[in-house]
Image (cartoon, grey):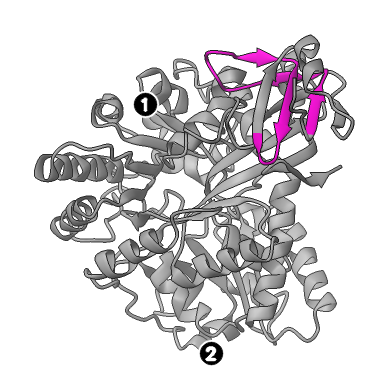
Amino acid sequence: MTLSADLLISNARVFTSDSTNPSAQAVAIRGNRIVFVGSDQDAADWRGKSTHKIDAAGCTLMPGFIDSHIHLLKSSLGLEDLHADTVSTYEEFKILLKNYANENPDKPWLTGFGFHYNLGPSHTPFHRNHLDAVIADRPVFIISYDFHTAWANTLALMQAGIFHGADCGANNEIVLDEHGEATGEVREFGAMEKIKRLLPKPGPVEKRRLLLKGLKYVSSLGITSVHNMDGNAEQAELYASCERSAELMVRVYLPFSFSPDTPFDSLEKDAVGMMHTYQTGSVRSGCVKFFIDGVIESCTGLLLEDYADRPMSRGATNYEIEYFNSLIVEADRLGLQICVHSVGDGGVRCVLDAYKMARRVNGQRDRRHRIEHIELVHPDDISRFAELGVIASMQPYQAAPCLDNNDAWLWRVGEERWPYSFAWETLRSSGSCLVFGSDWPCVSPNPLLGVHNALNRRSWKEGCPNQRMTLPNALLSYTQLAAYAEFQEHCKGQVKPGYLADLVLLSKDIFNISPEELKDVHPLITMLDGKIVYEA
């Protein structure tokens, strides 16, 4: 052979995500492309004097993980905020907040995220007084782990001018008590914005510093591509500037974020503009993101029937349905891929109906529209995903792996709906294209934790469908299928000659350990474009 490889990885358990060649022992790379996938014996032909050789020691080599739903910039900007995701009791939270305040005496606002619902004393609903008891002389604002609810102390509510409530728009609420005073709980983005507008904003230098910190973090987890599920031209240009300076350590696909108050013509002016500007290289656009509903925990997710613990309440849509349908039809006409946050079964049905309408009005094409989250789906709608070619984008690490009596989500939907909750295997086996992500910062972006949950989830009660996945199917949802979900299945998501050399070498052969051990596996090497960007 006249050509030798720049890099040769041998003695590996290669999971290729390529159905025509599912496993191998060695991979050779020239430049930023894979040139050989096969046996150790045949790989010898690619060895040259300058070839860098890596002995994988029998560990798993696979395509780099693609996180199909993440908020990378938002999460990066919060890396140095208070993190409450590991707190399980009010007493633990008090210690955490007090320590954080003492460590940051110059911060005018104390902000954090990851907070769990019902974390008041003895798992009662949280109240501003519970924050005041810890910190009363500085404004405190803590966002829930799902980012759809937040809690503020009295001083923060006063400074925001919402202590006695305010108009926040449809499906948003500043919760008031029987005296007309704020309890401290604010629900959904319109209500939270009343406080968030007062928070200190990072300057360009600080924003870039934190983003680079976040990029290094996700790269260390074996992630080589992300679908950044919020975006605008400013954010796209920030990623593009990192690419130009060779500091972008993952590939980024991001939408234009459309909210209820975004002008209708922004679809053509802004979303299509981003698509034309960012269509090559490692920063790409071409999609638009909507929210049809909120979340189950705050009862803002749209259900087809009443919440189990709140009769007469089914949540609401963020748009009038007729207007939402017109947005979907127009975005589809413009050739945009559409991603819609939809948590409740009512929201899922609304989105499926809108996609069906768009197909009828605009004709056939390769759309690959998506529904994000699908925490609850009605059995009548399961087959519609495959029928309409709609991608199911889900986050396995967000589901309770077993029955948890303190999990507000489980009791809000009620036992009758548990069989259709986080029903990823049900959707996959029905023929849906199922892709996985994290929704970081809502939960850890570590994809191996998502794989672990997908393989180890237990039924919440007898008779519920088994949602456990096989290891190959879970990995496909983080690789080949995730690449398909962003129209990139021709160049990434598989270990295949001609494909981009975006790879991760794990610390074990994950096909030769128990599913329970997956949570302890970590990347040894992450490679992007044929270059090692992380090494343990």
Q: Furthest-front residue in view?
A: 2
| Image side of residue 220 versus residue 477, left or right | right
Picture residue at 85% right of the left edge, 27% below the top: 48
Q: Nearer the viewer, mark 1 or mark 2?
A: 1
Picture residue at 27% right of the left edge, 56% below the top: 317
Q: Which mark is residue 530?
A: none
Residue 345: image quadrant is top left
Along the line of sight, the residue nearer the viewer: 321 or 330? 330
Residue 275: image quadrant is bottom left
Q: Furthest-left residue in view?
A: 361
| Image side of residue 449 versus residue 325, left or right | right
Instruction: Name the secondary structure under disc 1.
Output: loop
Q: Is tag 1's residue or tag 2's residue first in the polypeptide sequence?
A: 2
- Vertical relation: 460 (above or below) 139: above
Q: Which mark is residue 432?
A: 1
Q: Which residue is mark 2?
A: 159
Q: Position of residue 223 (x, y in %)?
A: 66, 43
Q: Position of residue 46 (x, y in %)?
A: 78, 22
Instruction: Name the secondary structure under disc 2.
Output: helix
Picture residue at 74% right of the left edge, 55% below the top: 216
Where are the magenta residues, as a range?
7-33
* In magenta segment, residue 10: yes
